[in-house]
Image (cartoon, rainbow, N blue to C red):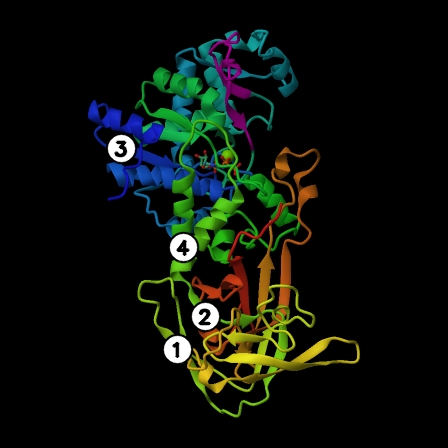
Amino acid sequence: MSEEKSLNFIEEIIENDLKSGKYETLVTRFPPEPNGYLHIGHAKAICLNFGLTQKYGGYTNLRFDDTNPVTEKTEYVNSQQEDIQWLGFQWKNELYASDYFETLHAYAVQLIEKGLAYVDESTAEEIAVQKGTPTEPGTPNQYRDRSIEENLALFAKMKAGEFEDGTCILRAKIDMASTNMLMRDPIIYRIKHAHHHRTGDTWCIYPMYDFAHGQSDSIENITHSICTLEYVSHRELYDWFITQLGIFPSKQYEFARLNLTYTVMSKRKLLQLVNEGLVSGWDDPRMPTISGLRRRGYTPESIREFCERIGIAKRENLIELSLLEFCIREDLNKKATRAMAVLDPIKLVITNYEGDGEILTGENNPEAEDKGGTREIPFSKELWIEREDFMEEPAKKWFRLAPGAMARLKFAYIVKCENFVKDADGNITEIHCTYFPESKSGSDTSGLSVKGTIHWVSTKHAKTAEVRLYDRLFTSVQPDAEEGDFKDYLNPNSKEVLSKVYIEPALAEATLGTGYQFIRKGYFCLDKDSTAEHLVFNRVVSLKDGWKG
Ligand code: ATP
Ligand code: MG
C-alpha cells in the first residue's frame, strides 16, 4: 500500500470547513487574465484548484479576469482553454469578469450611496504623494468629503464618457492612515476609452483588479479563492468590499508561486520574447508556456506529476528545472517507443556481409510491462552510425569501435573494425568492418563477448529528418533577479538544428503528441512543422541529466 500523503495547508483548511459545515459544496476557480498564454506556473495553480474539487467534490470555474481592455485578446482566451483541457481538467462554468461589469458598477454605486466611495480629480502624482509612506500616514484631500449626490453625479458622468482618460477616478473611502497601504482609499474604477474584447465599446470605465476579483468570487459563490503570495496584503481589502457590500463571504488563501530556474515566468515578459522575435512564438519549445512544453514533447501526466512533487508551500522558493526534466524522463521511459536515429552520421561498411533484405526484430520498449511489442528493422551491408562511436586512437576503457576493436550493433551482429577511409582533408569518411554471422542478437552462439553496443540505421532504408536540440533558454539561474534586462541573459545556444539526421524507417510513421526514445540519444517527438516530405523532431530531454552548471 502506498504511504498516505500528508495534507497541504489548504487541504487542511478545506477539510475543517467541510467538517464544521461552514460550506456544503467546495467551489474553486482558476482566474487567468487573458493577456497571454498560460505557463508552467499557471499549471501549478490549475492542478491545485481543479485537484481540490476532484478530491473533495464540488466544482471549479474557469473565470477570465478580463477587466483590462488594453491587454486582453480572444486568442488568449482560446489558448488558455485549450491548455487547461490538455492538462486534463474540465471546468464547470466558463465565466468572464466582464460579464459582471453591470453588477460591479451597481456595487460601486452602493458604496457611494453608503458614503464609502468618492470621485477624486487629483493627478496621479498628487495621489501618490497624498498616499503617504509605510511609516507615515496619508493625507485626505478635498475630494474625500464630497457629498453623496455629487459623487453619484460625477460617477454617472464618468460612465457616460464625459471625461477623458485619467481625469478622475473612483476611490473607496477607507482609511488614509491604515498600516496597509492598499487600504488607503484604493482606486476602484478608472476611465479607459478602450475597446474590450467582449463588451466592445459599452464601457469607458473599468473596475480595478481589487474591486473585480473578490466580488467576482462572491458572485460565483467561490468558497476558497486561492491565489499567490503577492496578494496577502490585498486580503484585507478583499474582505472589506465583501463585508461592506454584504455579499457571499468568499475567502482568500495564498500559496507560494512557482519559480523555476533558468526561466522567466510572467506573461508580460514572455510576450516580450515573442514580440521581439527572440523565440518563434508562444509555443516555441524552449518557452515555459504550457503550449511550448506540449510542443517540446512534455505530456500532461509529467506536468501534473511535477506539480504534485513540488507541493503547496506558504513560502517563496525556487524549483530546479531539472525536476521538471526528471518528470518527463520518468514518464517517457515507460511510454516511449524506442527507435534508432543517427544524429551525426558516418558510414560503416560490413565488408563480408552479403545478405539482402534481412529484417531484424527490435523490442519497442524494454521498460514497459508488455515490452511495447516489437517492430521490424531492415539491415544491410552499409549502415550509418554515430561519428562519436568510432575513435581512431581509442582512449582507455573505450568499448566502442576503433581499429581492431569489436562492438555490437543493437538488435544485430557483433562487428570488428578492420580499417577506415579518410578524405583529402583527413576526415574519416568510412569505417570498414567484418561481422560474425553466429553473433546475431537473440541467437548468439559466437562465444564472443563485447561491452559496447551502438545504434545504427541501414543507409538504403534510412529516412532523413531535421532534428532540433534545445538547451536552457537563459544562462542565468534567475534571469529576472539579475541586474539589467532579463533578456541580456538569453542563452545564444539554446537551439541547435541538425538538418540531416538518419532515422529508421518506422519513424516515418511518427505521430504528433507521441514520445519516442532515440536509443542513446534522448527522448524526441514530432514537431508541428513536420510534413510527409520533411520530418522534424524536437528533443524533449536527454536521457540523463547531463548538464553541468
Ligand atoms: P503573469 O505575471 O504570468 O501574468 P499573473 O498572476 O498575472 O501571472 P494571472 O493570469 O492573473 O497571471 O493568473 C491566474 C492564476 O494563476 C492566478 O490565480 C495566479 O495566482 C496563478 N499564477 C500565476 N503565476 C503563477 C505561478 N508562477 N505559480 C503559481 N500560480 C501562478
Ligand atoms: Mg495578472
**Gap in Å between the C-alphas at discs 4 and 2?**
18 Å
Q: Which quadrant would residue 416 be assigned to in this image?
A: bottom right
* Mark 2: few/some/many CA within 10 Å (<14, 14-19, 20+): some
Which of the two residues, 423 or 161, is positioned nearer the viewer here? 423
Q: Amino acid at mark 1?
A: Gly
Return the residue at label 2.
Answer: 510
Task: Of the two numbered discs 4 and 3 on the same chain, state the one appearing first in sequence.
Answer: 3
What segment carries the magenta color? 169-192
In percent of width and height, residue 212 lies at 43, 28
Return the residue at label 1.
Answer: 442
| Pointer 3 with pointer 1, Cβ within 8 A | no
Task: Of the two numbered discs 4 and 2 on the same chain, state the one appearing first in sequence.
Answer: 4
Q: Which of labels 4 and 2 is toward the front? A: 4
* Mark 4: few/some/many CA within 10 Å (<14, 14-19, 20+): some
Number of numbered discs present?
4
The kind of secondary structure element at disc 4 is: helix
Return the residue at label 4.
Answer: 331
Q: Is residue 180 magenta?
A: yes
Residue 44 versus residue 236 in the image, above or below: below
The kind of secondary structure element at disc 1 is: loop
Q: Which of labels 1 and 2 is toward the front? A: 1
**Gap in Å between the C-alphas at discs 4 and 3?**
31 Å
State the residue at coordinates (58%, 43%): 263
**Gap in Å between the C-alphas at discs 3 and 1?**
58 Å
Q: Amino acid at mark 4?
A: Asp
Task: Of the two numbered discs 2 and 3 on the same chain, state the one appearing first in sequence.
Answer: 3
Q: Which of labels 2 and 3 is toward the front? A: 2
Q: Amino acid at mark 3?
A: Leu
Name the quadrant of the N terminus: top left
Which of the two residues, 127 or 488, is positioned nearer the viewer here? 488
Query: What numbered label is drawn on residue 26?
Result: 3
